[in-house]
Image (cartoon, rainbow, N blue to C red):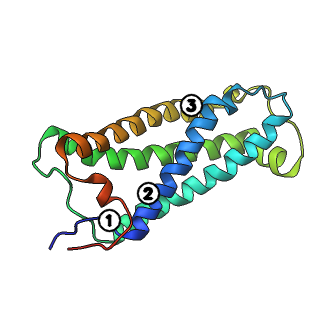
Amino acid sequence: MSLSKYNNPQVALHWLTAATISFLLVTGTFILSHIDNTDPTKINNLKIHMIVGGLALVLTLARIFWRARSPQPEVLDNSGSLMAKAGTAAHYVLNMMALVIAISGVGLALLSGLPEVVFFGQGVLPESFFDYIPRYVHGISTKIMLGLVALHILAAFYHAVVIKDSPFRRMWFGRQNA
């Protein structure tokens, strides 16, 4: 018996994680990275980024855990084609990249003393975060993630508009019919 859609907790985790990661990617790339470390507003922006980043990590881990322990609908295209395999792999790669981004962010925060500065007001921000290797990993992986998210969205619309196999109905709230 195959399921027609994802279960509601999985749908909620998907959309909450998508919104959280999108917020982090956009604000981190287009706002936070352009604020100089000597600007006093940087600390509050980092505080928000770190808190929301922690939430993204928890949501990603919850998604992985929930997916592993709940029944899943069949893949939309189970033909075994290269495109079908890429679609299946993309979901694993998105989760992996979210974890790489989160772990490199935690590493950067710990190495640069950010928790003390941001949450306890002790010390100052380093002159540059690029003095720490995790900053390079964090920056490169976020650019990769931006591309993967764009491809994920394009693939969803391709399935919806061209193939017409209802990917949005599968990833929305409602009864999980068999």
Between 103 and 53, the one lying in front of the other is 53
Q: Residue at x 28, y 65 (%)?
A: 5
Residue corresponding to mark 1 = 6
Q: Residue at x 89, y 47 (%)?
A: 121
Quarter residue 152 falls in: top left
Q: Secondary structure at mark 2?
A: helix
Residue 128 spot, x, y in % from top left = 74, 26
Q: Earlier in the sequence, mark 1 or mark 3?
A: 1
Residue 117 visible in the displayed image:
yes
**Labelled disc at residue 165:** none
Q: Secondary structure at mark 3?
A: helix
Contact? badges 1 and 3 (CB < 8 Å): no
Residue furthest right in the image: 122
Q: Amino acid at mark 2?
A: His
Q: Amino acid at mark 1?
A: Tyr
Q: Amino acid at mark 3?
A: Gly
Marks 2, 3: nearer the viewer: 2
Which quadrant of the rendered structure holds the N terminus? bottom left
- Label 1 packing within 10 angstroms: few (<14), some (14-19), many (20+): many
**Labelled disc at residue 139:** 3
Between 54 and 177, the one lying in front of the other is 177
Contact? badges 2 and 1 (CB < 8 Å): yes
Residue 113 visible in the displayed image:
no
Residue furthest left in the image: 79
Residue 73 spot, x, y in % from top left = 24, 64
Between 50 and 17, the one lying in front of the other is 17
Q: Residue at x 35, y 49 (%)?
A: 92
Quarter residue 117 falls in: top right
Residue 143 spot, x, y in % from top left = 49, 30
Q: Earlier in the sequence, mark 2 or mark 1?
A: 1
Marks 1, 3: nearer the viewer: 1
**Labelled disc at residue 14:** 2
